[in-house]
Image (cartoon, grey):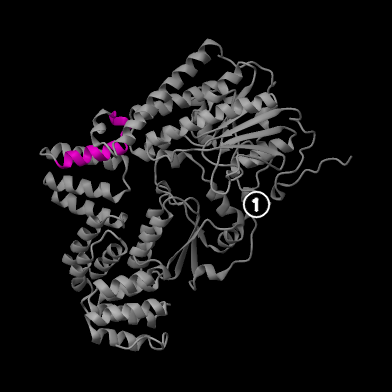
């Protein structure tokens, strides 16, 4: 038989590691927040364990593209379970974790009955997977904690405060470290936390860094079309969510383009996520559609092209304790196509082990049959206490969710656990006579959920009620910039811009209102003359830039604009957009002209003449 081949780091994870040091061992990996093999770090670890001879089973949730409840990939068994609740807010995540714990426990015992488990590797978040492992430790199964996130810092970053729930995160983290035989840290900051806050012995904490699989992530020739005809390109690769700071990146784009006058840079954002549609709308409302490309969840070839073409990769995470101590996967991906040697760690370098090179280490260094320390009565007490806490918090979650239909329930939800309930409390306070209480509750709401513009609008109302008019004006401006879906904020910012003589900003807010179905036509008709009335003024020119910046605007602009905009302004904006290459659908344009003719035949005739070259079959007046 031929000897197994050891591959270089840039050639990827080998099929077989020489000597197969884990042969005969059964390793169960439990992941709660992502399906496998989509979670790249854990999948690299699983492949490495398989290459080392271990039998590898994985428990993870289902997800888009990973709906199968069981499958075998590369000899690795993947058991997936449903997550019926979509987590929103702190207590929402708790409900999700409760459902996940149920399925993880059921599947773990099912797997154990089929083939005895030797090691369980729990990958946080959450810091609750030790509850699945505790009963198995009584039978000599070791628990390895794969430390992906520092949840106390994550909670503080997400909700802007400490309190009961923060302390609960710290407690679960401590219990996790107490239950773990070995901890795998993604960097030295996490290792320090495991030792100092978790009380683990230094020799039981190993740094195993994350990195891209360089056998798949390859440099390709730059593709100029991603630059959209511009000289430079800035790229972002990652999740499009509220916590990733993409709104800050859009703020930066607006500053670079509008304030600095730099129109030679294209921004390409790769990735999908729950905030993608909102971020696209935010970009369009600011007239930046031509400068920002959203690819959505892109195929590998597009990802490689973007990474190889961009001049600069950005990571717009907000500054907080979580991000300050964490190493983001995207940073390593940015570096790889630029100089792949930066990601190739030496096998004997303890400061920068690749996930594939070092994942087997903690499994190999200690006897598998060793009994866990501190089990027995302490383990049972910890188990029952944690389950009771989970049950109590799950019940409180139901009360919080119930406030959407029954606002009166908000009063019984403890302050640290309020999510939906805090919105109700702040709304009730805003409608009362106590302006100080209204302001305090609105400020508490915004600290917990700073991004939704509706919450900022509520804070502005409370500030105005408390006599803090300057602060209210600033708050409503921020609400308008951050929340394209909040009509009150957009209208307020528009009127402030008009009073300040900033017609361009007023036009951007008008565009945001225009996009919203909730905006009454009467309001757009009222505001139109002030914003768009000047022929070839800044209002009209700004709207032309927005319309020509993306095809998705065209149909809505033609249908609604002909109905609500000043006829002469609509005709001029549409004609100039055509001159700049806007690809209006001729059928929709014809319908728009018929509606415009009923309002102003002369304006319709001017637009019909401008469009004759593109759509020669347009109906005459």
> For this view, does 559 lie left or right of residue 172?
left
Report the quarter where the C terminus lies: bottom left
Report the quarter where the N terminus lies: top right
Relative depth, front residue between 385 and 7:
385
Q: Is 466 covered by the magenta stretch? A: no
Asked whether residue 39 is in view, the answer is yes
Relative depth, front residue between 305 and 508:
508
Q: Is 416 covered by the magenta stretch? A: yes
Relative depth, front residue between 509 and 394:
394
Farthest residue in the right direction?
1
Residue 487 in picture, x, y percent from top left: 25, 57
Query: Residue 2 falls in which quadrant of the image?
Result: top right
> For this view, does 432 lie left or right of residue 105?
left
- Residue span colored magenta: 413-431
Residue 168 in picture, x, y percent from top left: 40, 26
Count of labels in the image? 1
Overall secondary structure of the magenta stretch?
A: helix
Q: Is residue 21 above or below residue 347?
A: above
Q: Which residue is mark 1?
A: 341
Residue 561 in picture, x, y percent from top left: 29, 73
Q: Is residue 219 above or below residue 568?
A: above
Q: Is residue 605 above or below residue 157?
A: below
Q: Mark 1 falls on what kind of element?
A: helix
> For this view, does 246 lie left or right of residue 306?
left
Which residue is located at x 26 percent, y 32 percent? 409
Label 1, residues with CA under 10 Å away: few <14, some 14-19, many ≥20: few
Relative depth, front residue between 600 and 347:
600
Residue 270 in picture, x, y percent from top left: 51, 57
Which residue is located at x 41 percent, y 68 percent? 552
């Amino acid at each position: 038989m031929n000897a197994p081949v050891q591959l270089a780091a840039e050639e990827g994870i080998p099929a077989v590691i020489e000597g197969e040091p884990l042969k005969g061992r059964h390793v169960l990996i439990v992941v709660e927040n992502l399906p496998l093999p989509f979670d790249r770090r854990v999948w690299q670890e699983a492949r490495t364990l398989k290459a080392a001879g271990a039998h590898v089973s994985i428990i993870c949730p289902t997800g888009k593209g990973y709906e199968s409840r069981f499958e075998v990939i590369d000899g690795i068994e993947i058991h997936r379970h449903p997550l019926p609740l979509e987590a929103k807010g702190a207590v929402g995540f708790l409900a999700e974790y409760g459902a996940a714990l149920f399925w993880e426990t059921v599947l773990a015992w099912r797997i154990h009955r089929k083939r005895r488990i030797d090691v369980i590797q729990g990958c946080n978040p959450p810091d609750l997977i030790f509850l699945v492992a505790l009963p198995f430790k009584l039978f000599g199964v070791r628990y390895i904690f794969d430390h992906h996130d520092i949840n106390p810092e994550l909670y503080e970053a997400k909700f802007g405060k400490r309190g009961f729930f923060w302390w609960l995160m710290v407690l679960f983290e401590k219990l996790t470290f107490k239950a773990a035989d070995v901890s795998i840290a993604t960097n030295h900051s996490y290792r320090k936390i495991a030792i100092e806050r978790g009380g683990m012995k230094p020799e039981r904490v190993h740094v195993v860094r994350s990195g891209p699989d360089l056998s798949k992530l390859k440099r390709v020739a730059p593709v100029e079309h991603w630059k959209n005809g511009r000289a430079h390109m800035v790229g972002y690769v990652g999740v499009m969510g509220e916590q990733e700071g993409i709104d800050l990146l859009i703020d930066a784009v607006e500053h670079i383009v509008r304030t600095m006058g730099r129109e030679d840079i294209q921004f390409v954002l790769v990735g999908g996520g729950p905030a993608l549609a909102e971020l696209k709308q935010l970009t369009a409302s600011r007239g930046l559609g031509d400068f920002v490309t959203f690819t959505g969840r892109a195929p590998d070839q597009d990802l490689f092209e973007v990474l190889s073409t961009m001049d600069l990769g950005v990571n717009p995470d907000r500054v907080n304790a979580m991000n300050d101590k964490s190493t983001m996967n995207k940073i390593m991906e940015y570096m790889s196509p630029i100089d792949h040697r930066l990601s190739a760690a030496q096998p004997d370098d303890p400061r920068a082990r690749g996930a594939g090179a070092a994942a087997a280490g903690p499994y190999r260094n200690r006897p598998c049959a060793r009994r866990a320390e501190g089990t027995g009565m302490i383990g049972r007490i910890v188990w029952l206490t944690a389950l009771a806490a989970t049950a109590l918090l799950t019940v409180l979650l139901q009360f919080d969710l119930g406030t959407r239909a029954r606002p009166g329930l908000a009063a019984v939800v403890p302050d640290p656990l309020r999510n939906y309930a805090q919105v109700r409390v702040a709304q009730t306070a805003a409608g009362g006579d106590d302006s100080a209480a209204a302001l305090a509750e609105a400020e508490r709401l915004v600290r917990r959920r700073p991004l939704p513009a509706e919450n900022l609008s509520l804070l502005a109302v409370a500030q105005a009620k408390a006599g803090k008019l300057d602060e209210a004006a600033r708050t409503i401006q921020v609400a308008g910039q951050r929340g394209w879906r909040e009509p009150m904020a957009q209208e307020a910012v528009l009127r402030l811009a008009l009073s300040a003589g900033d017609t361009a900003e007023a036009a951007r807010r008008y565009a945001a209102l225009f996009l919203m179905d909730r905006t009454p036509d009467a309001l757009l008709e009222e505001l139109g003359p002030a914003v768009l009335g000047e022929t070839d003024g800044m209002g009209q020119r700004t709207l032309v830039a927005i319309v020509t910046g993306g095809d998705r605007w065209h149909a809505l602009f033609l249908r609604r604009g002909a109905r609500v905009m000043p006829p002469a302004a609509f005709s001029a904006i549409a004609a100039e957009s055509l001159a700049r290459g806007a690809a209006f659908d001729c059928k929709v344009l014809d319908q728009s002209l018929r509606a415009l003719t009923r309002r102003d035949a002369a304006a319709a005739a001017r637009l019909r003449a401008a469009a004759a070259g593109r759509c020669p079959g347009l109906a005459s007046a």
